[in-house]
């Protein structure tokens, strides 16, 4: 499998240190990194040897196993983070350990990410990309305060079952039994099966015939289970009744079960369902670790959000109050300062609302309480606060809509509208036209903002992804991420798209459910 990281990653991670007590795992991980385009990979077998490399060499990223001799992964992480020369090195822990306390300790010490074994090359690539976009905090002394995060509430999807048999009729029978409950893929020989297992989309479970030409199911099982990037695949053998010795061998090399031919539909469904449920539980535990890391990083986002997005409005308020104390009531400077005071107080309030609400949404603790309200009236109220202080923009407003009552939360929606308009003002050039359009169709109400002369330096597909907020427009992008999260909690949506070939006219489109 040939995968290459993007050039930005390759240029950033020129030297990666791989630390694992098991030589085979060290070599496999190093080979995987080389296949991704990383040319300089250094290996260490214990914590002390790794520490020497970190202190003496220019290491760009550390991939470290949790359980190491001499110095554990956590001990090495702590030393790295408390050394002024090394604290900014991205540090990813790789482990089968998903104990809550251990993961929390890693987060407290400043781990960049946590990769759960077994993993695929694609998972490794994703973690590298994610780590690149996360700044490293200098101090990690305070204890993690997060409660145990809820399991990821991801949309249900069918898990994948690979059927491997050299007899096409057998494949058809099994596929017909399982296709309603699982995503079914097939292979009529061992070579094709191994190719699928080593692809970017490996199966969750494999139904593997023991007796096949060229390469037997036993050989396939052994290859899959000896590869750390495929060993997580659950294998169930399909076999004839007269193959007890082969069944025992199969279980010894890593299969979890077997089904005899001719296939009984009820037995097949029961066996597959049992082992698929185990796979689901493992995936949920992996998701829980990822959610713990994300929640920790969200708190870091709040720190930056507070420092930059709240600090400026507060400073402006203090300056304006100082001016107010110097001028008479009817003075023009007094009136101007009062306007600035009002504007920045509003921005401060919105930032606090964004911060608290987003945290609850991400934490899964937000309690949604929908009620009908008039979207047009709400938009008018938000606009009045902005238009008076932004005279360098040209507005085209079309909010004439008879049915503008939607079902949701007015305070959430007010924050969404404020964020969208604030984004519109901050990213359009002087004299730009801002169109505001309200429409209704199929029990959905849509508020669209069309912006001309937009000045942003990131692709619009990154606008709502908090993990991609690493440009000079990071505050604007973070406000859009907040807005989309608030729209989705109301069963709505927020999208962006260009309406012209030259990418000069940007559309932001908010959709909410109309009141029945």
Image: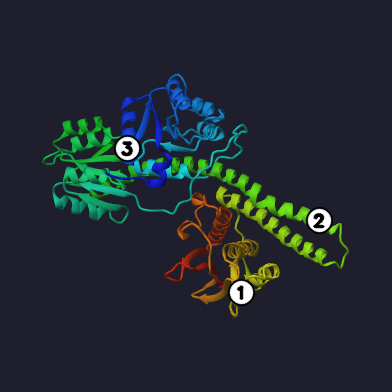
Residue name at image x 57 percent, y 52 percent: 361
Question: Could one spot residue 93 in this view of the protein?
Answer: no
**Quick one: 199 or 210, which is closer to the camera?**
199
List x then y, in percent, for residue 238.
20, 42
Residue name at image x 55 percent, y 53 percent: 472
Find out whether the residues at labels 2 and 1 contact each other: C-beta distance under 8 Å.
Answer: no
Question: Could one spot residue 248 in this view of the protein?
Answer: yes
Which residue matches tag 3?
34
Dot 1: what SS?
Answer: strand
Above or below, 349 against 17 in this view is: below
Quadrant in the picture for the C terminus: bottom right
Instruction: State the CA–CA distance, disc 2 to disc 1.
Output: 31 Å
List x then y, in percent, for residue 85.
54, 30
Instruction: State the CA–CA distance, disc 3 to disc 2.
Output: 59 Å
Callout 1 environment at 10 Å: few (<14), some (14 to 19), or many (20+)? some
Dot 3: what SS?
Answer: helix
Callout 2 environment at 10 Å: few (<14), some (14 to 19), or many (20+)? some
Above or below, 44 against 311 in this view is: above
Dot 2: what SS?
Answer: helix
Which residue matches tag 2?
321
**Quick one: 475 or 20, which is closer to the camera?**
475
Indicate which disc residue 301 carries.
none
Indicate which disc residue 394 carries.
1
Residue name at image x 86 percent, y 61 percent: 327
List x then y, in percent, for residue 408.
59, 65
Q: Residue furthest right?
A: 328
Q: Earlier in the sequence, mark 3 or mark 2?
A: 3
List x then y, in percent, for residue 426.
60, 62
Instruction: State the CA–CA distance, disc 1 to disc 3.
Output: 53 Å
**Quick one: 318 or 439, which is closer to the camera?**
318
């Amino acid at each position: 499998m040939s995968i290459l990281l993007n050039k930005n990653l390759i240029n950033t991670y020129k030297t990666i240190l791989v630390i694992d007590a098991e030589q085979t795992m060290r070599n496999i991980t190093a080979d995987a990194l080389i296949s991704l385009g990383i040319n300089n990979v250094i290996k260490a077998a214990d914590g002390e040897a790794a520490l020497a490399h970190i202190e003496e060499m220019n290491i760009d990223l550390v991939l470290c196993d949790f359980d190491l001799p001499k110095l554990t992964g956590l001990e090495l992480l702590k030393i790295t983070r408390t050394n002024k020369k090394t604290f900014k090195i991205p540090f990813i822990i790789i482990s089968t350990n998903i104990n809550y306390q251990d993961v929390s300790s890693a987060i407290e010490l400043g781990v960049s990410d946590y990769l759960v074994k077994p993993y695929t090359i694609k998972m490794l690539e994703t973690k590298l990309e994610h780590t690149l976009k996360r700044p490293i905090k200098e101090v990690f002394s305070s204890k993690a305060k997060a409660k145990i995060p809820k399991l990821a509430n991801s949309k249900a999807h069918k898990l994948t079952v690979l059927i491997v048999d050299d007899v096409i009729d057998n494949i058809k029978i099994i596929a017909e039994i399982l296709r309603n409950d699982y995503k079914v893929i097939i292979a009529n020989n061992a070579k094709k099966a191994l190719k699928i297992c080593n692809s970017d989309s490996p199966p969750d479970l494999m139904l593997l015939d023991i007796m096949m030409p060229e390469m037997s199911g036993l050989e396939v099982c052994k290859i899959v289970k000896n590869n750390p990037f495929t060993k997580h695949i659950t294998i169930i053998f399909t076999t004839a009744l007269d193959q007890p010795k082969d069944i025992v061998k199969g279980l010894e090399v890593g299969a979890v079960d077997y089904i005899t031919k001719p296939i009984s539909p009820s037995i097949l469904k029961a066996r597959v369902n049992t082992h698929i449920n185990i796979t689901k539980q493992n995936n949920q535990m992996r998701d829980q670790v990822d959610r713990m890391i994300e929640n920790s990083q969200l708190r870091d986002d709040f720190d930056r959000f507070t420092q930059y997005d709240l600090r400026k409005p507060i400073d402006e308020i203090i300056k304006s109050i100082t001016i107010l104390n110097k001028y008479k009531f009817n003075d023009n400077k007094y009136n101007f300062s009062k306007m600035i005071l009002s504007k920045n107080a509003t921005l401060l309030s919105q930032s606090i609302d964004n911060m608290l609400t987003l945290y609850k949404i991400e934490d899964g603790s937000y309690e949604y309480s929908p009620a009908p309200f008039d979207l047009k009236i709400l938009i008018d109220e938000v606009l009045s606060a902005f238009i008076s202080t932004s005279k360098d923009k040209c507005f085209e407003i079309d909010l004439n809509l008879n049915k503008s009552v939607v079902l949701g939360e007015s305070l959430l929606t007010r924050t969404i509208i404020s964020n969208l308009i604030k984004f519109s003002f901050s990213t359009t050039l002087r004299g730009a036209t801002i169109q505001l359009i309200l429409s209704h169709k199929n029990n959905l109400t849509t508020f669209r903002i069309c912006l001309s002369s937009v000045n942003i330096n990131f692709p619009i597909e990154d606008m709502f992804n908090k993990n991609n907020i690493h440009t000079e427009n990071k505050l604007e992008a973070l406000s859009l991420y907040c807005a989309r999260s608030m729209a989705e909690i109301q069963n709505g949506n927020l999208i962006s798209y260009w309406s012209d070939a030259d990418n000069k006219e940007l559309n932001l489109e908010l959709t909410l459910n109309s009141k029945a």
